[in-house]
Image: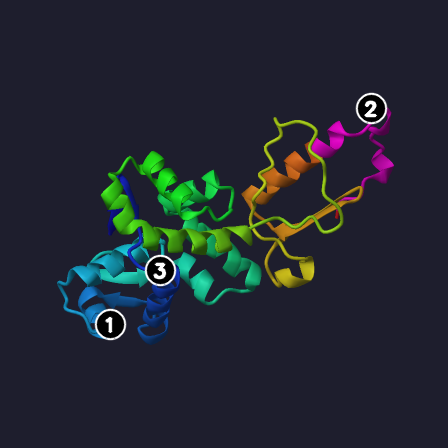
Amino acid sequence: MAKLGTYSYPDIRFSDAIEISARILNKFKGSIRVKGLAWELGMAENSGTLFAKIAALRDFGLVEGRGELRVSDLAQRIINPANESERLQATSQSFKRVDLLFALYDRFEGEAPDDKTLLVALEEITRADKPEIIKRFTLIQKHLNDASRALSHHTVNFTETEVSIPTPSLNIPSSLPDSSNIADLGDVDALILRAGDAKLTAPLSLEYIDIAINLLKAIKLTMPNDDFSFHPDQTNIN
């Protein structure tokens, strides 16, 4: 496990972590002992490099267990997703598990900072010594680029129009899980919302329900009071 200050982060890239997880899943039915993984990867059983790789798999949430490693449900949704929306959402969740990467992504709002700006941010966030930051800079920068690509796809798609939020008290995040149109959701339970010109289709989850509620609150604030009336005969609940 790599560390910078009090923050830990994976010692290998996400693509490499997924490749190892896929080998465990496909060749060993999703479960392997540490000794077996050492043989599979051609490494010594007690090598620091092997344990760094295993720690990275755990950092990303791709494996569970100690003596026996089991491919997690999160990893399976990335390796064998039901659809692209599920893969993107699971990949985003994996990166969000790494506090340092998510803190950097949030700080720069998904943009790629220049080298000096990233160095300064790492010092301010981790409080680590400059030589240690410089030593670990290249891998962290690559991790941040990977995280930015993954998290940038994790946004809700308002397919017909964007809704203007009239007050900051409505908590509708600017970066949200990926949503495709309903045809792309396959057999996944879906949340479908049509309110005026705004339309939202997304997987059904507590997170999306909160988003839909906040969206409706935002639309309500933009409507004149005399437009808000309830007519039982116009309500259709299937």
State the mark number for residue 13. 3
Residue farthest toward the top in the current orientation of the protein: 225
- Is residue 191 in view? no
Callout 1 amino acid: Leu
State which tag comes first along the sequence, 3 or 2.
Answer: 3
Seen from the viewer's position, the closer of residues 11 and 235 is: 11
Quarter of the image holding residue 173? top right
Q: Which residues are magenta?
A: 218-237
- The question of residue 91 being in magenta is answered with no
Q: CA distance from mark 3 to mark 1?
A: 16 Å
Q: Please say if the residues under marks 2 and 1 sit with CB atoms less than 8 Å apart.
A: no
Quarter of the image holding residue 99? top left
Callout 2 amino acid: Asn
Q: Is residue 29 left or right of residue 235?
A: left
Relative to 145, does residue 122 appear above or below in the rendering?
above
Seen from the viewer's position, the closer of residues 209 and 85 is: 85
Please tell me how crowded label 1 is: few (under 14), some (14-19), or many (20+) other residues with Cα within 10 Å.
few
Q: CA distance from mark 2 to mark 1?
A: 66 Å
Residue receiving disc 1: 41
State which tag comes first along the sequence, 2 or 1.
Answer: 1
| SS type, badge 2 | helix
Q: Please say if the residues under marks 3 and 2 sit with CB atoms less than 8 Å apart.
A: no
Residue farthest toward the bottom in the current orientation of the protein: 27
Residue receiving disc 2: 225
- Is residue 188 in view? yes
Q: Residue at x 23, y 57 (%)?
A: 52
Seen from the viewer's position, the closer of residues 156 and 24 is: 156
Find residue 192 and report its horizontal and vertical position in percent: 69, 49
Please tell me how crowded label 3 is: few (under 14), some (14-19), or many (20+) other residues with Cα within 10 Å.
some
| SS type, badge 1 | helix
